[in-house]
Image: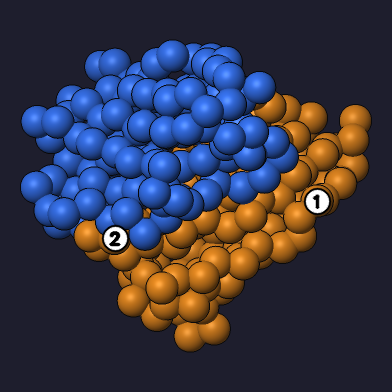
Chain colours: A blue, B orange
């Protein structure tokens, strides 16, 4: 079946603008994660959705960042009033969480450039 | 929360030699430890994982060992090849919780 998809693949925006990044997880995967990866850096956790539970937002760097997951499937990460330091690749991942932890599958990422 | 440390940050080996990457974790409740390979410009992909009820797992040239008492786990790549060159990430997780990633190891295999 199809893997995790993300759109857009690239986004260039001007400082101060809002952006929305989309993630389509693998069908049936109840867990969805957002990460940020700056150039040459590791994976910075942003937010985690698990089924109908309240999301774990502990990784969001500021109140300019928010995320939603509608209908337990598609997720949107919104960055308001973008800053140059927001420039990074934003990765989404999903997993089939049931009785235990299972493998995460990553999407191709969205490369965000804030001018 | 969990804290995962990964060493070394960079590693260069001659083709055919072995490479070892080590990670430590802090949360004794973590029970799942995956390793991801990320080639330049591509998404991370799982290469091997181990659960806390197992001490070692092997898949062809790669193996992972886990020491629960010491809270560390390692990735071993034998007979390295140029295509093994990539960034490798370790991670730790437990049921119902997020994944915590190490900072990555950039492996270069010199032909």
Q: Nearer the viewer, residue A69 or B6?
A: A69
Q: Nearer the viewer, residue B89 or A15?
A: A15
Residue with the mark numbered 1: B10
Residue B38 visible at all: no
Q: Is residue A83 shown left or right of residue A73?
A: right
Q: Is residue A62 left or right of residue B107?
A: left
Q: Is residue B99 left or right of residue A110?
A: left
Q: Is residue A45 above or below residue A1?
A: below
* Co-location on one chain, circles 1 and 2: yes
- Say above or below: B104 vs B5: above
- Crowding near the residue tagged with mark 2, few <14, some 14–19, many ≥20 C-alpha atoms within 10 Å: some
Q: Which residue shows up at 83% across the image and 37% down it?
A: B109
Q: Residue at x 42, y 55 (%)?
A: A59
Q: Position of residue B102 (x, y in %)?
A: 58, 58
The quadrant the N terminus of chain B occupies is: bottom left
Q: Which mark is residue B97?
A: 2
Q: Residue at 62% of width from left, 67% of height from top?
A: B5
In which quadrant of the rendered view does residue A99 lie? bottom left
Q: Position of residue A95 (x, y in %)?
A: 28, 41
Q: Which residue shows up at 39% across the image and 49% down it? A: A63
């Amino acid at each position: 079946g199809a893997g995790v998809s993300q759109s857009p693949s690239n986004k260039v925006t001007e400082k101060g603008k809002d952006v929305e990044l989309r993630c389509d997880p693998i069908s049936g995967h109840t867990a969805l994660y957002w990460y940020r990866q700056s150039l040459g850096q590791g994976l910075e956790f942003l937010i985690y959705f698990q089924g109908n539970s309240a999301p774990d937002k502990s990784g969001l760097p500021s109140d300019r960042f928010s995320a939603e997951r509608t209908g337990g499937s598609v997720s949107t990460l919104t960055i308001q009033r973008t800053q140059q330091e927001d420039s990074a690749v934003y990765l989404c991942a999903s997993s089939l969480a049931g009785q235990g932890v299972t493998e995460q599958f990553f999407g191709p990422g969205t490369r965000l450039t804030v001018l | 929360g969990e804290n995962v440390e990964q060493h070394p940050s960079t590693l260069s080996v001659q083709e055919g030699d072995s490479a070892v990457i080590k990670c430590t974790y802090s949360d004794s409740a973590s029970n799942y430890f995956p390793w991801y390979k990320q080639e330049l410009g591509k998404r991370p992909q799982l290469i091997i994982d181990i659960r806390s009820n197992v001490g070692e797992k092997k898949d062809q040239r790669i193996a992972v060992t886990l020491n629960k008492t010491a809270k560390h786990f390692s990735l071993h790549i034998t007979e390295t090849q140029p295509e093994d060159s990539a960034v490798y990430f370790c991670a730790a997780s437990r049921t119902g919780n997020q994944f915590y990633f190490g900072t990555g190891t950039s492996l270069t295999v010199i032909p």
